[in-house]
Amino acid sequence: MRHVGLLQHKYIIRIPSYLRITRTVATRIGASYFTTLHSHLITMKHQLNILKLIILIAIISAVITGCSKETPVSAPDPTTTGSIVLEFDNIAGDRQLELNSTVPYQNALGEKFSVTTFSYYISNIKLQTATGETYTVPQDSSYFLIKESDAASQKITLRNVPSLDYTSVSFTIGVDSIRNTMDIAKRTGVLDPANGMYWSWNSGYIFVKAEGSSASSSNGSFRYHIGGFGGITSQTINNIKSIIVPFGNSAATVRPTVKPEVHLLVDVLKIFNGTANVSITSNPTVMFTPYSTTIANNYRGMFSVDHVHND
Amino acid sequence: MKTKLQYSSLTLMPAQCVRASAVVLRVCTLILCSVLLVSCSDSVQNTLDTPTDVRLAVPSNFPPIRYNLAANQISTDGFILGRTLFYDGTLSRDGTVSCGSCHQQSSAFTHHGHDLSHGIDDKLGNRNSPPVMNLAWQPHFFWDGGVHDLDLFSIAPIENPVEMDEKLDNVLAKLRSSPKYRSLFAKAFGSEDISTSRFLKALSQFMLMCVSSQSRYDSFVRHEGAVLSERERLGRTLFSQKCGACHSTDLFTDFSFRNNGLEQRTPFDSGRARITLQHEDIGKFKVPSVRNIALTAPYMHDGRIRTLEGVLNHYRFGMKVTPNIDSFFIRQGKNPGIDMTDNEAQLIIEFLHTLTDTDFTTRRILSEQ
């Protein structure tokens, strides 16, 4: 049995800042209060304060205990397996992404827009440990379509994952060339062309689809359908992007009894903002054109890990 | 009516350097393939409305099939389902446009008389509707080759806003709610499950059977009785010399993408470059087969030429110096084109008429029932 040191620092997640104190600090506060308390015990007028204090201590303790990870985690053991959840939380800068939001978002060029569709493929997922071990999700189970319009699609559960302490995840944004060219009989589930993420006139999947409305566009809307796997008989653009997203100071401790949840943030603003800022006015519609590579290069930076729960 | 069929012979490949087990495996595969291709050699292609034994045969003057038949074995019930779908307007948004609307059997499965495809709400496409013909031999589809697999083809006209303007998932939903289709799918595939794959493969089964190989020319080259006149034979020689570099083999196309010096029009159609995004592919289109060419006017990717004489006149006098014009047409000291006298042009046209296959355009099992 051992503690996973990294994780003991994770108890302040999503606690309001005025409650962000460590257990040590909390104990010190409590002790000093009790010391002070003793000299005032005889004074009835302080009874109300004591009551308040007890309630305060109780609340602080409850909050700290509730969020701390004091439960020891068993040692990694790749002979056993567990599950891990990847949550894709779509955001727009410092706001949660909300489809058809009446309060517009704004890109780096100051153009205001709302989003009506935001969907993307995640595939070929691998998990890595700090010591160089890699777990590759079996190929046939490694294709996911994340849609902002479908909450259930935003949580991916990977099962039968070896019990290790994972520190990063890597994946492809889009669909590899093999899946872009294989027999239709094998294209089931999210790879079914009936899902609307497929170009019929130029066989291939749309990797990332972002649509919305914007006063900056001459026709009032923008439509970005980004794909391109490199072509079959003739070489053409390849927008398949593979990225690695580190978990930061956390590890995801997959165990038979621990199912970590990796909370990824996916920032739709990064479609517009990057090494080249995309103008809705200049490019209201981008599909299978050379400019699509600019958007693909931008959106490879839209993923980050916010935190990891090990529950 | 009985139709005589020809079959290609399969030859064993040298296997000296292959392990014995591999040889056995290969021989077994060949036997299986042979059974698939030859088992109907005693049968005849059924011409009744309700066929009993639908099989795809390889005419002996054709090259090998490109389509992967092993992944979609043609069955009579699969063919009937595909035919029903092909002629059903349910595949379009408002039920008015079927595949057969723009691919009419009497015109060798093209849209005769329409320069551009004519779809839903009387909308016009931007290209001339090509024939549904000998697709088992085609390595890619559309004028620009944007689709590489026949099974993936049908999604495009269904979802094109100016053709059928429907969504694939919606088509499937309509079919699933139809007792007739649930029954047809069950017959064809063993259960009522109506999936994207089954839907597309059934359509492929029908389209694969749209084989045109019974023209007078075919009968002549296969020594089945037909004769060509002296003028037609002269025309054949001239065609081979002047057109055969691109319209090669008995499929009469090499399936390459070429720029044939058509004047650029507005809106500009970049052709193959739409798929490859390569500058050198701008204005290139797939070389079409000239089988049944007398039935499929108008001509070129946008149907801009109305007659065969007009087509030959384009190659003789009308070609423009376009950026990617095919080197075949380059002539010293002259505009690009093909040297051809009036008489030669007339002989070539007479030969082209021998490629008309009335069996194909009237074969009952390919018709709307």
Image (cartoon, rainbow, N blue to C red):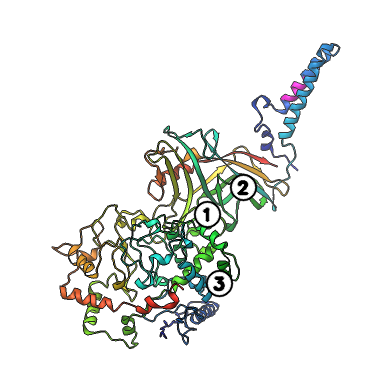
User: Mark 1 — on which chain does it sit?
Assistant: A
User: Where in the figure is residue B174, as x and y percent of width and height?
Assistant: 54, 60
Pick the front one: A189 or A15: A189
Disc on res. B223:
none
Which of disc 2 and disc 1 is earlier in sequence? 2
Determine whether B342 is above or below A63 in the image: below
Label 3–label 1 contact, CB within 8 A: no
In the image, residue B20 sits, relative to residue A113, either above or below, namely: below
- Label 1 belongs to which residue? A195
* Disc 1 residue crowd, few under 14, some 14–19, many 20+, Cα 10 Å: some
Q: Which of A175/A36 is in front?
A: A175
Name the amino acid, label 1. Asn
Q: Quadrant of residue B105?
A: bottom left
- Examine the structure image and report whether residue A26 is included in the region drawn in magenta: yes
Question: Looking at the image, which is closer to me, A273 or A253?
Answer: A273
The region drawn magenta spans A25-31
The answer to whether residue B331 is left or right of residue A135 is: left
Distance from disc 2 to disc 3, alpha carbons, whole Å, reads 35 Å
- Residue on which disc 2 sits: A152
